[in-house]
Image (cartoon, helix red, strand yellow):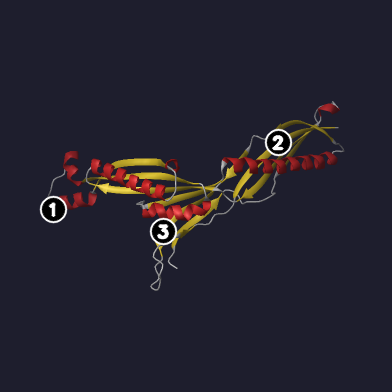
Amino acid sequence: MNRRQLLCGAGTALTAALAGCAASTQTDESTSTAADRTIAVQTQGEVGAEPDQALVRTRIDITGEDAATVRDALSKRADTLRDGLKAAGLDDDQLTTDRFQLRDRIDSERAEQAEAEGERIDSEEDLDEYRYYVGSHRFQIEVRDVDEVGSVVDTAIDSGADSVGRIEFRLSEDRQTELREEALELALDDARTEAEAVASEVDASLVEAKAVDTTEGRVSTVRADAGELTDEMPDDTVEQDPSTDIDSDDVTVQATATVRYRIS
């Protein structure tokens, strides 16, 4: 089978785990009143799940002798890319500009060669003959079905994109909320377990939770950096249309619970 392969290195800040937790505990017995004795516990709950969305970054590059030509070529190629993605079923709002650049450069090799041949280059105006322009238009493509990431990459390349950069696998807001609730439940359960264990060490028992803080937490997306896009073309291949396969690890959601318990 003729298959286009995206060679990339995937990395994530956290390893997905269903119930991994870390805890820290602090006791306060400095006051003389028993009612003021407390234990503070901080725990983390973490859950992992397959991503349900992705963000593909792709770019168009143009080089030309004048800025207007480069600008117009970038615009035309952008329209072609947008039309190709739209024909593949993507909505207009799924393709957005990430960065646009247009800058001038000097062909120093040609200028040095000219000087070596006796031409005088004494001013900026003299360099105009060796000036050229480089433009790039970088896009973000929102993919709402991770099974379609490879197909979107193929469509972008076939529609005129010069390169595919980082691909970020992530979770929709609804899925993030759902998983955070699960991670928070794990963290709170472990907080009570940890507090009970510490209380028993000081011959005390938990009375009630005086304060709870669950504001901390994070989502660790999975990123793939496209190092090289190659077309494998075996001599005996029959299929003419290459396809790209991209796999992703789980995305992790972490919640932190800080709880202060009154003990007696």
Q: CA distance from mark 1 to mark 3?
A: 41 Å
- Left of 67 or right of it: where is 263? right
Residue contact at pointers 1 and 2, CB within 8 angstroms: no
- What residue lies at 48% left-to-right and 50% top-to-bottom? 167
Number of dots carrying numbers:
3
- Left of 129 or right of it: where is 253? right
Judged by depth in the image, the label closer to the viewer, 1 or 2, is: 2
Q: Quadrant of residue 242?
A: bottom left
Q: Quick check: 195 above or below 235?
A: above
- What residue lies at 24% left-to-right and 40% top-to-bottom? 68
**Residue lying furthest bottom in this view?**
236
- Secondary structure, mark 1, is loop
Identify which amino acid the numbered label 3 is placed on.
Answer: Leu
Please report whichever mark, 1 or 2, sits nearer to the chain's N-terminal start. 1
Say few, some or many: other residues with alpha carbon within 10 Å of mark 2 (under 14 / 14 to 19 / 20 or more): many
| Residue 72 horizontal/vertical position (percent) | 27, 42
Q: Which residue is mark 2?
A: 258
Pick the front one: 31 or 73 = 73
Pick the front one: 196 or 68 = 68
| Residue 193 horizontal/vertical position (percent) | 79, 42
**Residue lying furthest left in this view?**
118
| Residue 200 horizontal/vertical position (percent) | 85, 41
Q: Which residue is mark 1?
A: 117
Q: Which residue is mark 3?
A: 229
- Left of 41 or right of it: where is 250? left
Image quadrant where one finds the C terminus:
top right
- Secondary structure, mark 2, is strand
Image quadrant where one finds the N terminus:
bottom left
Please report whichever mark, 1 or 3, sits nearer to the chain's N-terminal start. 1
Pick the front one: 237 or 27 = 237
